Structures are given as C-alpha cells and as structure tokens.
Amino acid sequence: MDWRSVEFDWNRARAFLVTAEEGSLSAAARALNMAQPTLGRQVSTLEAELGVTLFERVGRGLQLTEAGTRLLDHARRMGDAAGALSLAARGQSTAVEGHVAITASEIYSTWLLPRILPRLRAEAPGITIEVVASNAIRDLKRREADIAIRNARPDQPDLIARLVAEDRGTFFATPAYLDRLGHIAALDDLARADFIGFDDTPNYIDALRRYGVPVSEANFPVIASTHPAHWQMARAGLGIGVGPCGLGDSDPDLRRVLPDGPFFDYPVWLVAHRELRTNPRVRLVWDVLADALPALLAEG
C-alpha cells in the first residue's frame, strides 16, 4: 500500500474517541470546548471515510456499534501516542515563554484565577495563559490542559499531584430572600426553601439528603447549567445557592443561610503530567499556583 495516498485527520479520530468516552455529543463537545454541530460533522465525516457506522442513538445518548467498539482501542492508542508526542516536544523547550493551559472548575476559573493571573503576567510576560473553565475532568495525557486544579486526587500513575489547600463550601442566599423565607434555625427548616439546581440536580439532591437536608425535586424551581450562572441566580434572590465560603462571605449581596453549616469540605489539588515537570514555563505557573491558591482560599 502507498501510505502517501492515505489521508487521515486526527481531529476526527479524537472527536470519535471523546464522544465514545463521554457517551453523548453534547458532553463530548463540552469536554473538547467545541460546538456540538462541528463535533457531529467530524464524527459523521470519519464514518463516511471509514465506511462504517460508529454510533447508534439510545435514548438521549449514544452507544458504540460493533464496528465502533472494535475501533475504539485503536483510537485510544492514537490518542496516547499523540499526547506523548506533544508532551515530548513541549518538554524540550527551555525558554520561559509560550502557551500554558490551566483547567479549573467554572467557579475557580471566575473567582480565583483572575486574581492570580496578574502575578503570572508580571513574573513571566512571555507566557500566554489559557484558562479552560470546565467542571469536566480534563485529560492531561491528551494535552487538553497542562495543569489542572482539581478537587479530587487523580489515580493515573503518569500524573503528578500536589495537595495545596483545603476548601469549604456552604449555602448562601440574599438577606431579602431569607427574610421572605422566614426563620431558619435548623436543617429541617430548609424543607420549605427554594434551592437553585444544577443540570445534574438529581445527584445534587442525593448529596444534600446525605447531609441531612430534606429536599425533593419540588425544592428546585430554577436550574442552572453552569456554576457561575447558579451563583448569579442566588445573588438575584431566586433561592439558596451553594459555593465556597470564601466567595460567599466576601459577597456583600449574600449571607450564610445557617452559620453552623452544613459545610462541604473538599481538597484542592494541582495536577500535571510527569513529562512536564521539567518544562520551565509549566513549572513556573505550577509554582505560582501552589503559592497563591492557599493564601487566596484562606482570605476569601
């Protein structure tokens, strides 16, 4: 075979791989920070090029066909190889300049990182910082980000992680909403409150019940698909929101619903690929984040 005649687009293979791993086009589009129609076209084009059907629709999600299942391992190996190539190339750089992508949750990306970036710009003006605001777990092996700020320790052996801080969240609402709600002295009183939900509200309800908060779907008349939107809805007086104590306590428009909790504690980890630990620009950004995050979380 003349391999020069074979045309292959890695972007289409990556679209197939991430869609298979996420289970739907919408979730894959969010993971890749791509428009869903564009992602769908890439998958369809790959199917046409290969002459196979890779997915079949099941309910609101996608399920791999037999052909798709057979090709998935090949796509994963391609993804690992592409990631290793990119990591190796980036590791050769010795200049403290270039591009560094940081992925963090939506709330940390809008609350904490904007307060750290001026320091990074002052210390390394040659570095271009990309903030990937996402609650999805970004794949550092495939170079979707260089550094991740996560609230759980990763279990992949080729990643390095450092616990840099502990954070705590609780319920917040506007004083006007709490006045309308009436006296709240205990968790049982929250059964008559309106809460602002997320797009995974059933899981949120289950979590709240485990903390002893007596809520049902009837307590969630408003739902937000992002945490920043959730927070702004709480600030608008639409109900009770949840967020970091440092963020809420520093907001003049909000106050804690119950001074004594419940509190939601979670660690803050810095994560990167082992092959990037000697890259000067990534190391500099890592060190600044490790130094700045504990202080910012402590002061709120």
Image (cartoon, rainbow, N blue to C red):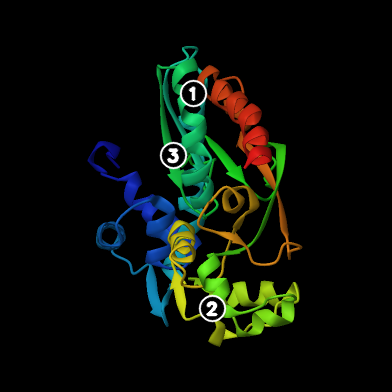
Q: Which mark is residue 131?
A: 3
Real-space Cα distance between discs 1 and 2?
44 Å
List x then y, in percent, for residue 68: 43, 65
* N-term mark: 3 or 1: 1
Secondary element at tag 2:
helix
**135 lies left or right of 151:** left
Secondary element at tag 1:
helix
Q: Which mark is residue 171?
A: none
Which residue, given by chain and number where applicable, does mark 2 sit on? 180
List x then y, in percent, for residue 160: 67, 35
The amino acid sitting under disc 2 is Arg
* N-term mark: 1 or 2: 1
List x then y, in percent, for residue 234: 49, 65
At horizontal 51% and vertical 69% (from top left) the residue drawn is 176
- Categorize mark 2 by other alpha carbons within 10 Å: few (<14), some (14-19), many (20+): few
Real-space Cα distance between discs 2 and 3?
39 Å
Which residue, given by chain and number where applicable, does mark 1 sit on? 120
- Categorize mark 3 by other alpha carbons within 10 Å: few (<14), some (14-19), many (20+): many
Which is in the foreground here, disc 1 or disc 2?
A: 2
At horizontal 57% and vertical 47% (from top left) the residue drawn is 250
**37 lies left or right of 152:** left
The amino acid sitting under disc 1 is Leu
Q: Is residue 72 above or below residue 86?
A: below
The amino acid sitting under disc 3 is Val
* N-term mark: 2 or 3: 3
Which is in the foreground here, disc 2 or disc 3?
A: 2
Q: Quadrant of residue 157?
A: top right
- Categorize mark 1 by other alpha carbons within 10 Å: few (<14), some (14-19), many (20+): some
- Is residue 206 visible in the rendered image? The answer is yes
